Image: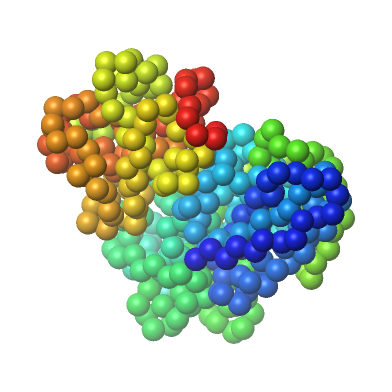
Amino acid sequence: MLVTLALAALPLCSVAAPLSVVVNPGDQGEQSRFAVFSEWRQVLEQSLRRERAAGGLQLTQSNDATADLSATRSRLNDLVVGPAHVVGSALRYGYQPVATMDKTVQAVLVAPQSSSINKLSDSAGKRLGLPMQDSVVTYLLRGEINASNSTIKQHFGAVLESRYQDALLVCLQIRRCDVVAVERAVFERWQAAGESLKVVMQSKAVPGLSVALKPGGTLNAEGLRASLQGAQAGSLKLQAVGADAFEYVSTLGYFTPRALPGATQVDAAAVAKLLQGGALFIDTRNEAEYKAGHAAGAKSVPYHEKSAKEADFKVEDDKFDLSQLPADKASALVFACNGPECWKSFKASHVAVKAGYSKVYWFRGGFPEWRAAGYKIEGSP
């Protein structure tokens, strides 16, 4: 769900387009999410009133980190406010870190005190309760388990997902979950309320909700940083943050594999040659990303992704309109999306191979690599 607020123009000089800001309050209940969003709205209004030359402010509340991660790669928003993995992604695609909350976030794996599980290896084959796949908690846990040369699906016997972290306590209480992954602050709140629980694994700490600024805009990062630190709303307190604070979270996450059976992986230069030879460039991103900028001549065939970001994803959970591809199965097709972290082109390539297409080229670097290489772009990059 997206909630968009078009705020009145700030009365200074005129600017044609409003400043686009997305705020993702993280994994909280609806009331808490709205309260956090409201505090951020107040702080941003205060700060941007001081720093903007003029113009309106379009503020969007998001609870879809998948869409936010994708949007950072296409640079759809002027300012991004979100959890560490969203902002870390934004930094990889040119955004500047501006400010962060004064509290960090740490993912912990939690079990009942009476459980025989005392470390990650003890949880092998057990039932895991987990926030949704693009939660910062899931992002961190997945990265730590990947670092141990395993995957969540391989390590645990079953995975139960919950939209909100607090619902995972019930999963432990009714013994549907043997362990659950939550933020340390959530675990400490449960513990303070008298729940008999223990931490059996923890990630490193990462920044809390943070702000990143799109490059090349009218805002000055240093001025905005100073204004944000001076603004106040409820309990929200902000401090300066540098790119180094996001190095750890940026090494984790959902990077696609480096090979795809049945398809040929290609770089931007190879794609350019293929297009000269008549290949069709299939852009699997969503419509907004495609319109914001795409490789010249690319055809938009969005891949609607619901499956996990894993090599053995469930094709039946997703939607991809194969009828939009050429009828000739010998046609040369280049599939791309938003870089190594974007799984849409990987999955679309897999589907095309399974459908019998014999010349499938997977452009893993996708639109960001195409843009960086200086090849022709259509739309508004």
Q: Depth check: give the residue in front, 333 or 380.
A: 380
Q: Is residue 49 left or right of residue 206?
A: right
In the rendered view, tell whether residue 356 sits above or below residue 118. above
Looking at the picture, how far across and down is residue 194, in whole percent? 59, 84
* Image quadrant occupied by the C terminus: top right
In the rendered view, tell whether residue 76 sits above or below residue 116. above
In the rendered view, tell whether residue 100 sits above or below residue 90. below
Looking at the picture, how far across and down is residue 228, in whole percent? 81, 53
Looking at the picture, how far across and down is residue 122, in whole percent? 38, 61
Q: Residue at x 41, y 32 (%)?
A: 366
Q: Across the whole image, how many numbered discs are drawn on residues? A: 0
Looking at the picture, how far across and down is residue 318, in whole percent? 28, 54
Q: Residue at x 30, y 65 (%)?
A: 158
Q: Quadrant of residue 343?
A: top left
Q: Residue at x 68, y 46 (%)?
A: 17
Q: Residue at x 27, y 16 (%)?
A: 277
Q: Quadrant of residue 365?
A: top left
Q: Quadrant of residue 212?
A: top right
Q: Is residue 310 left or right of residue 288?
A: left
Look at the image and tell me whether residue 277 can be seen. yes
Look at the image and tell me whether residue 248 can be seen. no
Q: Is residue 6 left or right of residue 129?
A: right
Here the colouring is rainbow
In the rendered view, tell whether residue 206 sits above or below residue 297. below
Q: Depth check: give the residue in front, 74 or 324.
A: 324
Q: Depth check: give the residue in front, 221 or 78.
A: 78
Q: Is residue 300 left or right of residue 103?
A: left
